Image (cartoon, rainbow, N blue to C red):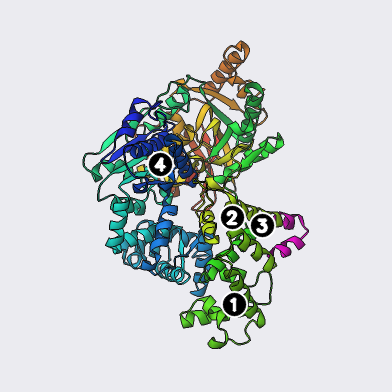
């Protein structure tokens, strides 16, 4: 084994060498946290800690695999294979399968993905004769998910007064009953959804002290990556598992806590020192990713948050280029600017497409960038589209495989009982469903004994033939690997042939997708694991693996030479040589939904911080004067976050709709090196003209936004950026009033959505 401590800086080494007792590693962006975490695991093992007694929890399978690989490389042996390293969901699924009988579940329980869960909820909502447009399955799913992550079962949900008041306010008083029915149906189907893997783990440890003691003794040392992203359920489970020895090491960065909409709470890391005595804290502030210019911007941005662990990122990397701040006339101009900038950088600095990322606040912003990139024949890859495993033909195939493993799974059973078509219509399925509910039996139990339940003739011989077919596939489970079973299913059901017969372009694509699915199963059965031996090749093992894939794990070709387009949330954990952070406008970024409380606004600022720290060499921040929103052309204010960046760190530029960024004075061409005397001179002229044309307005000392419903034509108002003006016209309803306001010198007439504008009435009528 080589000297694994070599190459660590002083703070990294301090974190690695601490063995016993609680440890909090505050790891700034790009500070080498993965290196510290893996080296710490290796150090524990080097100092006599058995690999079987170490638990390391991450948020992606990719991160878990990388950690295990690095530990094995450091130690130079195969002991790393005995580590419990994985995502929260995969590790807890593994434990729950071993202990499932205590909770009344089968060991081969199905794991429902988001689509499966929403489909089941839609069924339940319809069965309860509720309007699925009011009780939208996606909304209900998120509501139930939040409840589980807050450790509330259906009974606790119904007893929570604040929750009931909220449901009553939105006229969704049946939400608790839906949750109750959903939980019972999942149990009946022998299924858990993603949130259950956390919630049921908590229930298991809480209700069975012997199980808790077993795993407390097993996991003597616990390490958690990205601790700032944990929710209440994860926090509670970690607290219980680590209570015996308190050898808990958490690694994270409060400044990168951006998942509150998933239930994550930044308080977990902020209050870690209050949870344990004698917590050792180590701050990793040396950044190995970005230039100092980029870090200067990041430090200034996050410094505006009050609720944080103070840190100051620094680097030994070069100073680097200033950050380009680009203002465009419209969102389409913004798209053209970014595409031109990418093309110019490729030509001038020999970057590849894959060196660029375009990061935005919402997926809807991608359109203008996609159009501009296509127009210039720049290859790009859009993240956030339909995952391979969510495509209908793939879901259909997987439904068969899941039924073969777990016949209790009613949702998947209904999905494929008449696909390909075999004469079992909706009426027959409804009759079987009703009988199953009346008898308290599963759908499968009913179709196995149709005569016994008075359903002779329902569905004809097709139901009997279907049952015999599934039984024949099930006999293969113990003797055949995942690929052999899957191949037999594709052939025996006629599913593959049905897709092959469709000779349309779409049909060919669907056929190719199921072939790719079979390829992935073949690869699974033939790929050796870390021990050089073939892994568990069963169909059940394969299904668990793909169900627990995270978004980043689904990227089959991360090194493809394509510009990456994604939301900032999706970009967390990634890095790129050149980054464009786009749409920096008030009510877009920060979002209009995140400006009511300091907590929400600070999370938006952390999101901007995450975006900035994805950049290694060059960073652009862009915004548009106007863009279409809600079907209206809206005039935009620059984001308040732009004001938080000192001017000394910025190189400002402007491009109008008649100009192309990269060949026009005052546009992207102005980002050329200062040695280009002519261009530099033109930029200064353009900046002087711009500053003269748009004088800066300082809000009145008594500025306080008034109720937009009280504003009328003829009133004089004050805007924080545009100054004083007069309302000339009002359009729209109460919730989307648009005012045409004539402002003073340099701003002219603008159309503004009153709900988001923050105006002060200066003179009433």
Q: Quadrant of the N terminus?
A: top left
Q: Which of marks 4 and 1 precedes in the sequence?
A: 1
Gap between marks 1 and 4 measured at Cα: 48 Å
Query: Which numbered mark, 2 or 3, is in the foreground of this view?
Result: 3
Q: Which residue is mark 4?
A: 603
Q: Which of marks 4 and 2 precedes in the sequence?
A: 2
Query: Which numbered mark, 1 or 4, is in the foreground of this view?
Result: 1
Q: Which residue is mark 2?
A: 389
Q: Which residue: 45% across, 72% down?
A: 188
- Out of 330 and 268, give the one closest to the viewer: 268
Q: Which of marks 1 and 2 precedes in the sequence?
A: 2
Q: Secondary structure at mark 1?
A: helix
Q: Residue 500: image x %, image y %?
A: 74, 60
Q: Which residue is mark 3?
A: 514
| Magenta extent | 495-509
Q: Residues within 10 Å of mark 4 (few under 14, many from 20)?
A: many
Q: Quadrant of the C terminus?
A: top left
Q: Which residue is mark 1?
A: 429
Q: Residue 249: image x %, image y %?
A: 32, 41
Gap between marks 2 and 1 measured at Cα: 26 Å
Count of all numbered marks drawn on residues in the image:
4
Quick check: marks 3 and 1 in contact, CB under 8 Å? no
Q: Is residue 20 above or below residue 290?
A: below
């Amino acid at each position: 084994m080589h000297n694994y401590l070599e190459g660590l800086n002083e703070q990294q080494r301090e974190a690695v060498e601490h063995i016993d007792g609680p440890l909090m590693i505050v790891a700034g962006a790009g500070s080498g946290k993965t290196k510290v975490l893996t080296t710490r695991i290796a150090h524990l093992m080097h100092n006599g800690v058995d690999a079987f007694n170490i638990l390391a929890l991450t948020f992606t399978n990719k991160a878990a695999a990388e950690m295990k690989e690095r530990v094995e490389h450091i130690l130079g042996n195969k002991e790393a294979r005995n580590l419990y390293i994985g995502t929260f969901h995969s590790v807890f699924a593994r434990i729950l399968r071993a202990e499932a009988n205590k909770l009344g579940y089968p060991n081969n329980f199905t794991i429902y993905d988001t689509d499966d869960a929403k489909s089941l909820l839609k069924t339940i909502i319809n069965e309860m004769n509720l309007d699925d447009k009011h009780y939208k399955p996606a909304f209900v799913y998120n509501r139930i998910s939040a409840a589980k992550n807050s450790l509330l079962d259906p009974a606790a949900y119904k007893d929570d007064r604040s929750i009931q008041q909220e449901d009553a306010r939105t006229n969704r008083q049946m939400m608790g009953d839906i949750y109750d029915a959903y939980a019972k149906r999942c149990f009946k189907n022998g299924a858990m959804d993603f949130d259950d893997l956390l919630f049921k783990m908590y229930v298991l440890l809480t209700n069975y002290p012997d199980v808790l003691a077993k795993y407390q003794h097993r996991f003597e040392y616990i390490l958690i990556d990205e601790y700032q992203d944990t929710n209440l359920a994860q926090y509670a489970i970690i607290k219980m598992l680590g209570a015996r020895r308190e050898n808990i090491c958490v690694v994270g960065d409060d400044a990168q806590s951006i998942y509150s909409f998933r239930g994550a709470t930044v308080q977990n890391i902020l209050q870690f020192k209050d949870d344990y005595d004698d917590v050792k804290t180590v701050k990793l502030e040396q950044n190995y990713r970005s230039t100092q210019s980029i870090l200067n911007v990041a430090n200034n941005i996050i410094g505006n948050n009050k609720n944080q662990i103070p840190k100051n990122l620094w680097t030994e990397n070069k100073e680097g280029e200033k950050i380009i701040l680009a203002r465009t006339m419209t969102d389409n101009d913004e798209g053209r600017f970014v595409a031109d900038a990418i093309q110019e950088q490729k030509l001038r600095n020999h970057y590849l497409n894959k060196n660029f990322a375009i990061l935005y606040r919402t997926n809807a912003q991608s359109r203008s960038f996609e159009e501009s990139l296509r127009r210039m024949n720049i290859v790009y890859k859009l993240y956030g589209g339909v995952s391979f495993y969510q495509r209908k033909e793939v879901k259909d195939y997987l439904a068969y495989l899941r039924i073969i493993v777990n016949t209790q799974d009613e949702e998947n059973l209904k999905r494929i009982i008449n696909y390909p078509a075999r004469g079992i219509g909706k009426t027959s399925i409804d009759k079987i469903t009703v009988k199953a509910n009346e008898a308290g039996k599963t759908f499968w139990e009913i179709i196995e004994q149709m005569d016994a339940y008075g359903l002779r003739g329902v569905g004809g011989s097709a139901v009997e033939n279907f049952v015999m077919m599934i039984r024949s596939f099930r006999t293969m489970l113990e003797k055949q690997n995942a690929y052999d079973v899957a191949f037999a299913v594709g052939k025996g059901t006629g599913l593959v042939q049905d897709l092959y017969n469709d000779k349309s372009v779409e049909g060919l694509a669907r056929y190719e997708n199921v072939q790719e699915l079979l390829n992935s199963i073949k690869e699974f059965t033939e790929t050796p694991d870390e021990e050089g031996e073939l892994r568990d090749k069963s169909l059940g093992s394969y299904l668990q693996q793909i169900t627990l894939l995270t978004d980043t794990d689904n990227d089959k070709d991360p090194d493809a030479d394509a510009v990456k387009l994604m939301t900032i949330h999706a970009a967390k954990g990634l890095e790129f040589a050149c980054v464009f952070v786009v749409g920096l406008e008030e009510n877009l970024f920060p979002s209009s939904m995140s400006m009511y409380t300091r907590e929400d606004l600070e999370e938006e600022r952390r999101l901007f911080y995450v975006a900035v720290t994805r950049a290694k060499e060059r960073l652009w921040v862009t915004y548009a004067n106007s863009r279409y929103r809600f079907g209206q052309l809206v005039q935009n204010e620059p984001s308040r976050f732009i004001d938080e960046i000192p001017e000394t760190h910025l190189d400002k530029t402007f491009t109008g709709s008649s100009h192309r960024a990269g060949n026009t004075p005052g546009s992207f061409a102005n980002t050329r090196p200062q040695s280009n005397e002519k261009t530099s001179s033109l930029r200064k002229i353009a900046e002087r003209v711009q500053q003269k044309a748009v004088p800066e307005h300082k809000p009145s000392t008594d500025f306080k936004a008034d109720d937009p419903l009280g504003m009328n034509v003829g009133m004089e108002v004050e805007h924080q950026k545009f100054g004083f003006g007069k309302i000339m016209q009002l359009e729209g309803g109460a919730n989307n009033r648009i005012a045409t306001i004539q402002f003073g010198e340099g701003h002219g007439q603008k159309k503004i959505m009153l709900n988001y504008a923050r105006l002060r009435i200066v003179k009433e009528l």
